Amino acid sequence: MVIARTLGGHPSYDLRLIDGTIVKYALEADCEAVPADGGFPPPSAGAGTAAGSPG
């Protein structure tokens, strides 16, 4: 998760990793964009409805 960024000549970012550690001043060239949904597939069409119930 990006928690801060610089607006200087060479963009850099402060990142919070999944384990909670923070990486300061990561260069934009060293970062990889991921989908906004985190890469998780969307729920199936029938998810959330009880078996046998209409709709």
Image: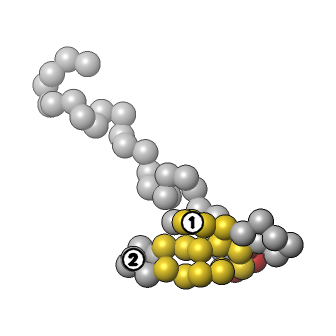
Which amino acid, by three-letter code, is at mark 2? Answer: Gly
The image shows residue 36 at horizontal and vertical percentages of: 55, 52
The image shows residue 10 at horizontal and vertical percentages of: 82, 75
User: Is the residue marked by circle 2 packed among few (<14), some (14-19), or many (20+) residues within 10 Å?
Assistant: few
Q: Is residue 17 above or below residue 1?
A: below
Q: For residue 20, which numbered disc appears in the image?
A: 2
Q: Are marks 2 and 1 in contact (CB under 8 Å)?
A: no
- Say left or right for 24 vs 45: right
- Between 24 and 45, the one lying in front of the other is 24
- Between 24 and 44, the one lying in front of the other is 24
Q: Is residue 36 above or below residue 30?
A: above
Q: Residue at x 75, y 77 (%)?
A: 29
Structural distance between the alpha carbons of marks 2 and 1 = 12 Å
Q: Residue at x 21, y 30 (%)?
A: 49
The image shows residue 43 at horizontal and vertical percentages of: 37, 43
Q: Residue at x 56, y 66 (%)?
A: 2
Residue with the mark numbered 1: 2
Q: Residue at x 55, y 66 (%)?
A: 3
The image shows residue 16 at horizontal and vertical percentages of: 48, 73
Q: Is residue 41 above or below residue 28?
A: above
Specify which label sits upstream in the sequence, 2 or 1.
1
Q: Is residue 39 above or below residue 6?
A: above
Quarter location, residue 9: bottom right
Number of labelled discs? Answer: 2
- Between 54 and 7, the one lying in front of the other is 7
Label 2's element? loop
Q: Quadrant of the C terminus?
A: top left
Label 1's element? strand
Which amino acid, by three-letter code, is at mark 1? Answer: Val
Quarter location, residue 33: bottom right
